[in-house]
Amino acid sequence: MKTDTFRGRDFLTLLDWTKEEVETILDVALDLKRRYALGELHNHILPAKTLFMIFYNQSLRTRNSFEAGMTQLGGHAHFLDPSKIYTPALPGKEVAYSTERVSDVARVLARMGDAISIRCYGDPVDWVYGDAHELIRNFAYWADIPLLNMECDKYHPFQALADVLTVKEKFGTFNGVKFVMSWAYSPSVHKPRAVPQSAIIAASMMGCDTVLAHPKGMELDDEVLDSCRKYAAMNGSSFEISNDFEEALKGAHVVYPKAWTAVPMFPPPVGERDDEKAQAIFDANKDWICTSDHMALADPQAIYMHCLPADRSFEVTDDVIDGPQSVVFDEAENRLHVQKAVMSLVMR
């Protein structure tokens, strides 16, 4: 594939990219990871380039992996912390940064740097599903430099890349790999859909036999589910939805239990704006926790994955996340390498 087709493109969701393009990103990530492991400098790739990072939500892995990645590629990352949360206002007049509109902030930063990255979900948009993704789309419309999605309320494409890169490293293939993305209990209902939705998109796109497991009331976006079914048909693999945690885990090669919020918590038209009803669904499913007994249901060579931070003793027991089947820190490190790959390709 000609990598010139990547230059200048936005990276908002894997749904905007082909399987061949994602394979190229993974190949570049593995090459950059090898160079990093050998101590080989590659700061000639993005010399003096600037990435602006706008965080409406706090971050540990995302902020540090992007900052470290830009430094290693020869550029610099600017951390921007808006003093006021995003305000929908009138169409085309969204407040994005203090009292400035999206259109103004995007065009100003585009004159000074080489890419803009944004993280926004949940409280900053009052849990109105799709509003955070629309904010990022608005930025992309007004900025004539690449826009990178560091997680919104619908998608977390960089985490998904790290997920499938980890699978590729551990199994050498995606064919025949049973990838189980499961809901898990958390004391907090304030968990976006972005990680599970992007994980099943990536797994099904790459050809895994993908299973989405969750209790009733935790359904994900129909658009995402339809895309997963299409990818499975394209690859000759499978995509299934299960409401039985233990049944879904049988024979799994990838066990990925992660909390996300219940449908009723979203305002209409998605849900009912009923936090109490959402909490009740959570509380009725406290047994959805990944234990060593649950891992024993999976394939003997199965790996445990989580995007982190994990709610220990709720989503997962310590003996699993700290045990020999856990690859969560490999997965976290791979955020660095896949992000460097995308930036290397789109910011040149």
Image (cartoon, helix red, strand yellow):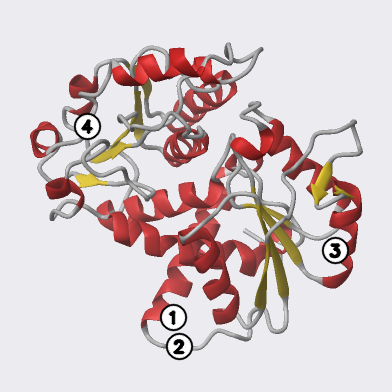
Q: Nearer the viewer, mark 1 or mark 3?
A: 3
Label 4 crowd (10 A; few <14 / some 14-19 / many >=20):
many
Choose the circle earlier in sequence order: 1 or 2. Answer: 1
Q: Which mark is residue 40?
A: 2
Q: CA distance from mark 4 to mark 1?
A: 38 Å
Choose the circle earlier in sequence order: 2 or 4. Answer: 2
Q: CA distance from mark 2 to mark 3?
A: 31 Å
Question: Dot 1 corresponds to which residue?
Answer: 35
Q: Nearer the viewer, mark 2 or mark 4?
A: 4
> Identity of the amino acid at label 4?
Ile
Relative to 136, residue 190 above or below: above
Choose the circle earlier in sequence order: 1 or 3. Answer: 1
Choose the circle earlier in sequence order: 4 or 3. Answer: 3
> Identity of the amino acid at label 3?
Ala
Q: Which mark is residue 320?
A: none
Q: Which mark is residue 110?
A: 3
Residue 248 % position (x, y): 24, 24
Q: Who's the residue at 85% across and 55% down the image?
A: 106
Q: CA distance from mark 4 to mark 3?
A: 45 Å
Q: Nearer the viewer, mark 2 or mark 3?
A: 3
Residue 339 seen in this snapshot? yes
Q: Nearer the viewer, mark 4 or mark 3?
A: 4
Residue 348 seen in this snapshot? no
Residue 249 % position (x, y): 20, 29
The answer to whether mark 4 and mark 1 are in CB contact below 8 A is no
Q: Secondary structure at mark 2?
A: loop
Res 203 quadrant in image: top left
Q: Who's the residue at 39% across and 48% down the image?
A: 307
